[in-house]
Amino acid sequence: MSILIYAESADGKFKKTAFELASYAKKIAGEAGTTVTALTINAADSSALGNYGVDKVLTVQNDKLKSFNAKAYADVIKQAAQKEGAKIVLFSATTDSLYTAPLVAVALEAGYASNVVALPESLSPFRVKRNAFSNKAFNITEINTDIKVLALAKNSYGLVESASSPSTEDFAPSLNDNDFTVKVESTEKVTGKVTIADAEVVVSGGRGLKGPENWGMLEDLAQALGAATACSKPVSDLGWRPHSEHVGQTGKPVASNLYVAVGISGAIQHIAGINSSKVKVVINSDPDAPFFKVADYGVVGDAFEIVPKLTEKIKEFKANNS
Amino acid sequence: MKILVCISHVPDTTSKINFTNGDSEFDTNGVQFVINPNDEFGLTRAIWFKEQQGANVTVVNVGGTDAEATLRKALAIGADEAIRVNANPTDGYFVAKQLAEVVKNGSYDLVIAGKESLDYNGGMVPGMLAAMLGYDFVNSCIKLDVNGTDATAVREIDGGKETLSTKLPLVIGGQKGLVEEKDLKIPNMRGIMMARQKQLNVLEPVQATNATSAVKFEKPAPKSAVKLISPDNLDELVNLLHNEAKVI
């Protein structure tokens, strides 16, 4: 048996989540006495995977796979898993990997656990801890099948460096036309802005900001922190900000290192969506805002005074520490 | 067009989550159940197809008798008929197998399920169902149009969106955006009365293995109290974020 990870890349470059996944896989491999194989699809340079303990890299270079296609990617990953005799197949919690993983699970007749937040509690029976009930609880799931598919929640394990010199092997999976029946017509991507999915820091605003015209100061703070901007549900419902920025239980989940909430009272649904973030800073004029109950650091006061001041302090700090 | 909308019966978003029976089961005591929000967007879009383009809409749930109230609500919103597969939905693989059987027997052209349910958050049933049926699949779908057997779907990607073209039969993992929140339908009295006359068929499950089982639940550890920082001392906040929390 071995462990296969799908090391996702975008425009040829690995995402940080791929290295987190490699770190996680290496730890399990150590306990199970096996090796880690990373599958890459059209990645430019796989050497960085050697910093996180990968033993072998399977590289697929194929123009047909230039744009992501769930069915085709699932077919490739399935073939790689079979070729390697992988008993554990690991995915990151990116949009594309979460799209693909259930297809791979069916192809391999494997049980699948998503939102995994820790190392397996035991390998036999195979038990892992995962987020459930929108981060309001954890669930220990036992996978009963021979092959196991897992998706690791972002920032739940972290990066653990472990130098290795992986062997590299070109892999040419067989693809058929049936893999490509869903066609990409066009892609719209915001450029030059940190996305909520990739962000290590997220700055989020609520109704306390009083109107869309006041978002400039939040964007300044976000820029100083290298953060993505987000908003609460009422703000997106009011049309102050696009739906794509709505974070919370029914919006996007956030699992950043730092989450800064400005003028958000902290409804239970909002907290559920952002609770996987490591450190939470809350700025609110109402000392009784429920958000303070789950925050690590709080500032009670007028956001319109605090946010610009904080932005200046952060800029000073960055200037002195870079 | 025959549309099947998969409905999860989940605790309302404001529910307090507790467990019972040695932390092995979700405690339903005092919990209000609703149509899973991601499914509700799909249901409303299905009814839009029915009203604007002509379609027959069936809703399906894999669950116990308690889920019938949720299915009746979907009928009151405008679905034509309902199916309940009489089984405990404990594993995504098992649920997808049951749904695949329903799709095959009903020859549906379009299957819409929420991309994720609010309870187990597995995010796997729509994809597994598509894979079992060999149908095309679009996940995180925020817009869907159908013209004859051609479909155009927009999916959310990290930092943007992508437009895809495909053909029926098709499985959709839907979410907010399929319709806007303000366009979600609330059942009216006439709908509720009509729902009582509509068919709700109960089917027995087909044989399928549970690929996973939820053995135990845990609640997050209580959080230590917030550290309050004076608005006049933001240097301290920067210092704590750097030296204590180590996030900047």
Image (cartoon, coloured by chain):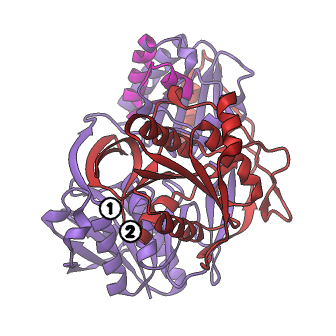
Q: Position of residue B102 (x, y in %)?
A: 53, 65
Q: Nearer the viewer, residue B173 or B7?
A: B7
The residue lying furthest to the left in this view is: A63
The residue that mark 2 highlights is A52
Which residue corresponds to the image point at 29% horizontal and 73% vertical from the top-left? A76
Q: Position of residue B36 (x, y in %)?
A: 61, 46
Q: Which chain is red?
A: B
Amino acid found under the numbered disc labelled 2 = Tyr
Q: Is residue B216 left or right of residue B244?
A: right
Q: Earlier in the sequence, mark 1 or mark 2?
A: 2
Which residue corresponds to the image point at 38% horizontal and 63% vertical from the top-left? A100
Q: Nearer the viewer, residue B203 or B89?
A: B203
Q: Quadrant of residue A92?
A: bottom left
Q: Which chain is purple?
A: A
Q: Which element carries disc 2, helix, strand or loop?
A: loop
Per the rendered image, the range of residues in magenta is A213-241
Q: Position of residue A162 (x, y in %)?
A: 41, 71
Q: Is residue A316 visible?
A: no
Q: Which element carries disc 1, helix, strand or loop?
A: helix
Q: Is residue B105 left or right of residue A265?
A: left
Q: Is residue B10 left or right of residue A217?
A: right
- In three-dimensional space, the C-alpha distance between marks 1 and 2, rounded to whole angstroms, equals 26 Å
Q: Position of residue A207 (x, y in %)?
A: 56, 18
Which residue corresponds to the image point at 76% horizontal and 57% vertical from the top-left? B65
Amino acid found under the numbered disc labelled 1 = Ala
The reply to whether the magenta stretch includes residue A218 is yes
Query: Mark 1, chain letter?
Result: A
Q: Nearer the viewer, residue A279 or B133?
A: B133
Residue B93's place in the image compared with B151, above or below, is below
Q: Cβ–Cβ below 8 Å for labels 1 and 2?
A: no
Residue B55's disc number:
none
The residue that mark 1 highlights is A70
